[in-house]
Image (cartoon, helix red, strand yellow):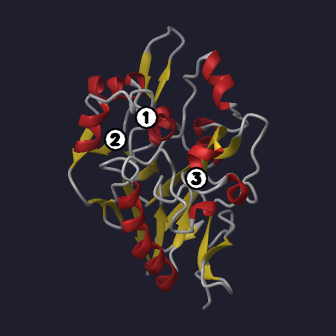
Amino acid sequence: MKFGEFELFLIEDGGFRLDGGAMFGVVPRVLWAKTDPPDERNRIRLACNCMLVKTGDANVLIDTGCGGKWSDKEHDIFAVDEPRTLITDLARVDLSREEITHVVLTHLHFDHAGGGTFIDNDGGLKVQFPNATYYVQRGEWEIANDPNPRDARSFKPENMNPLADAGVLELIEGDTEILPGIRTAVTGGHTKYHQIVFVESGGQTAVFNGDLVPTASHLPLPYVMAYDLYPLQTMKFKAPHLKQAHEQGWLMVFEHGAREKAGHLRVNEKGRYELAEYDMDEEVYSPPSD
């Protein structure tokens, strides 16, 4: 999709399932099940939506999905579904993994950073995008490499060690401009140094929300994941973020949205934000009319 001087693409890395109660925190099942019906194991369907930005000079990938380094046990626990993968979806837009120049990671949980490395035919761990610089918050990297028992299963060494070994990491501190028109903003909340990514061109703004607002079902302010380490910080950042997104007509991209993947916010008859879904396959971006 043409977006100002850039091109935007949703790049899918399959899907998986997580416990619905964990995904919605204190919200009762009777409410969240209306929009996200659980399976017999109380799991809801989630996607791994990454975003590719072609600037003309650079190919910037935002998050890398789960990747393919699953054990048989993990396949069962997470109901992994891989009809499309990161690499096959990049091929759909005529890009090879060698052509990615920048990778921006919102944080280092396995469902966001897992596709940044892979296991080669000899069983070795390799960097997925060998010509790219990988950007992550320094604080996130330090915590992920010395996790507490609550976090340890989310931060996997096989997703991080190859990046350090190959020298492709750039550790950033605080809100950072990656390239003109592409910048990060630290939100905290989900993890202490979780960040989102803004893409701005031609007077338009798209926001890759990471796990700040993982799906459109999480638009209500108290709908915060139990996985969030600092839920009150999530809510504190989320409230003005949604207000500004609505007032300025931002295109909101939802990383885990299995149904609604992107759209603009509108206020319904109850005064709550809801999504006006947007088709990311359109050739040219059309901002909201109101």
Q: Is residue 107 visible?
A: yes
Q: CA distance from mark 1 to mark 3?
A: 33 Å
At 44% across and 32% down in the image, what residue appears? 154
Q: Is residue 94 visible?
A: no
Return the x and y of residue 188 as percentages of the image width and height: 33, 55
| Quadrant where the C terminus is found in the figure | bottom right
Q: Which residue is mark 2?
A: 134
Horizontal side of 36 relative to 55 (left or right) equals right
Query: Taking 10 as reference, is 148 above or below it?
Result: above
Amino acid tagged 1: Phe
At 29% across and 25% down in the image, what residue appears? 166
Q: Which of disc 2 and disc 1 is earlier in sequence?
A: 1
Q: Which residue is mark 3?
A: 24
Amino acid tagged 2: Tyr
Q: Nearer the viewer, mark 1 or mark 2?
A: 2
How many neighbours does mark 1 have within 10 angstroms: few (below 14), some (14-19), or many (20 or more)? Answer: many
Give me the disc on residue 129. 1
Label 2 sits on a secondary structure element that is strand
Q: Closer to the camera, 159 or 233?
A: 233
Q: Nearer the viewer, mark 1 or mark 3?
A: 3
Disc 1 to disc 2: CB gap under 8 Å: yes
Give me the disc on residue 268. none
Amino acid tagged 3: Phe
How many neighbours does mark 2 have within 10 angstroms: few (below 14), some (14-19), or many (20 or more)? Answer: many
Q: Which of disc 3 and disc 1 is earlier in sequence?
A: 3
Q: CA distance from mark 1 to mark 2?
A: 9 Å
